[in-house]
Image (cartoon, rainbow, N blue to C red):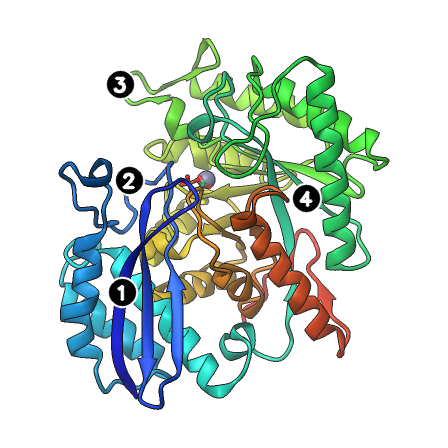
Amino acid sequence: YIEKVKAREIFDSRGNPTVEADVILSDGTLGRAEVPSGASTGELEAVELRDGGDRLQGKGVSKAVNNVNTEINKILHGADPFNQAQIDQAMIDLDGTKNKARLGANAILGVSMATCRAAANYQKVPLYRYLGGTDLELPQTFHNVINGGEHADNGIDMQEFMITPVERTSFRDGFEKIANTYHTLKKVIEAAGYQTGLGDEGGFAPDLNSSEEALKMLHEAIEKAGYTPGKEIAIAFDAAASHFYDHDSGNYNFEGTVKTPDEMGDYYVKLLSEFPEIISIEDPYGEDDWDNFAKFAKKVGDQVQIVTDDNVCTNPELFRKAIKMGMANSFLIKLNQIGTVTETLEAIRIARKNGYTTMMSHRSGETGDTFVADFTVATNSSQLKSGAPARSERVEKYNQLLRIEEELGENGSRLAKFPNDVDFD
Ligand code: PGA
Ligand code: ZN
């Protein structure tokens, strides 16, 4: 049983405070988890509790930490760590709000994840094995190698330009191709006379003039690294369009021009014809612009994966609404958008049942915790985006997948295909 739950304030990859939670079992077994934090957050995400005030730019999490150490510790003492659903529900009930605003989603998620870890450690099995079944596959990974939008101070309005390995013989083989392309991209950016400093997710953040220029550079880097765009390495992007959506006019203020929703759609279609290696587009429209989002998804959805993130925030209720509207054909999954492991699993189940693919995701503010790598494998989520193949808080997730591939390798490991199988299990 759970003896004690304890949290502390630690720091994330942006130097901002975040929650680390420990769950200690009666035999002394420890489970520990660190909570990530986003910058381009959806309006309807569960609430990350921050202290406000002067200390640490108001971003302190001492209130969330205190909630773990007092109220949550009190109700979980004696609880069964193997009953994850019951533990998560107890914290949801204790919080009492719809969006975890009282105790903080950062407090609740830390304990939720640490409970899984403690249970796995008690059974002496890897986390992916504790949470998952026996037939597991290694995901296709999406690597944000040019950072724009809220993640970098440059002239690019789209947030993430990603490369992803398609044809590969193993997870390791795919990752090597990505690393080669990343290093080649650096040379391409240098040759064009731009700075090669990094953005929040470890990708380069050159001060380019347009998103199209970023895509051209990816295309060139893939070729120069010796691969065929669309064959070994494909491209994906997250426009995170809420950040250039004008709520009042309903138009998009995009890279120096004002575009109507239809013009925005034409622009994306032009990119798709110019760069046929684009296989996935995330958040092409703002989070309040559901109708145009759905219209666009219906238009191009059989040609390309359309991922929705900011509109639906890993929320089972919002997933149902999006499915009804035909919003997209893929959901982004972020544990801290909803705040418990159990609700995240429910969201994944709803996605699968309705034929939607799932892309698991890190946050732009990350820690060294590799929970999301194990969670991707355990849920056969098939896709994971966790930033560039650089900077430890990003690469540790991929390193964990290399370890998992090695472990699964004894039984012949399976690689996720694109577009992946979404059968419900
Ligand atoms: P965030 O961005 O972690 O800064 O919210 C990630 C995303 O928009 O997918
Ligand atoms: Zn996003």
N-term-proximal mark, 1 vs 2 = 1
Cα distance in 3D space between marks 4 and 3 = 36 Å
Which element type, helix, strand or loop, lies under badge 4?
A: strand
Which element type, helix, strand or loop, lies under badge 2?
A: loop
Q: In which quarter of the image is the N terminus?
A: bottom left
N-term-proximal mark, 4 vs 3 = 4
Q: Which amino acid does label 2 sit on?
A: Glu
Residue ID for mark 4 = 164
Quarter of the rendered structure image containing ligand 1: top left
N-term-proximal mark, 2 vs 4 = 2
Q: Which amino acid does label 3 sit on?
A: Asp
Cα distance in 3D space between marks 3 and 2 = 17 Å
Density class for disc 3 (Cα within 10 Å; few <14, some 14-19, many ≥20) is few
- State the residue at coordinates (21%, 50%): 49
N-term-proximal mark, 3 vs 2 = 2
Q: Quadrant of the C terminus?
A: bottom right
Residue ID for mark 3 = 248
Cα distance in 3D space between marks 4 and 1 = 36 Å
Nearest to viewer (mark 1 / mark 2): 1
Q: Residue 353: horizontal and vertical position, in percent?
A: 49, 64
Which element type, helix, strand or loop, lies under badge 1?
A: strand
Cα distance in 3D space between marks 1 and 2 = 26 Å
Residue ID for mark 2 = 43
Tell whether circle 4 marks a residue whose Cβ is less than 8 angstroms from ligand 1: no
Q: Residue 135: horizontal and vertical position, in percent?
A: 65, 76
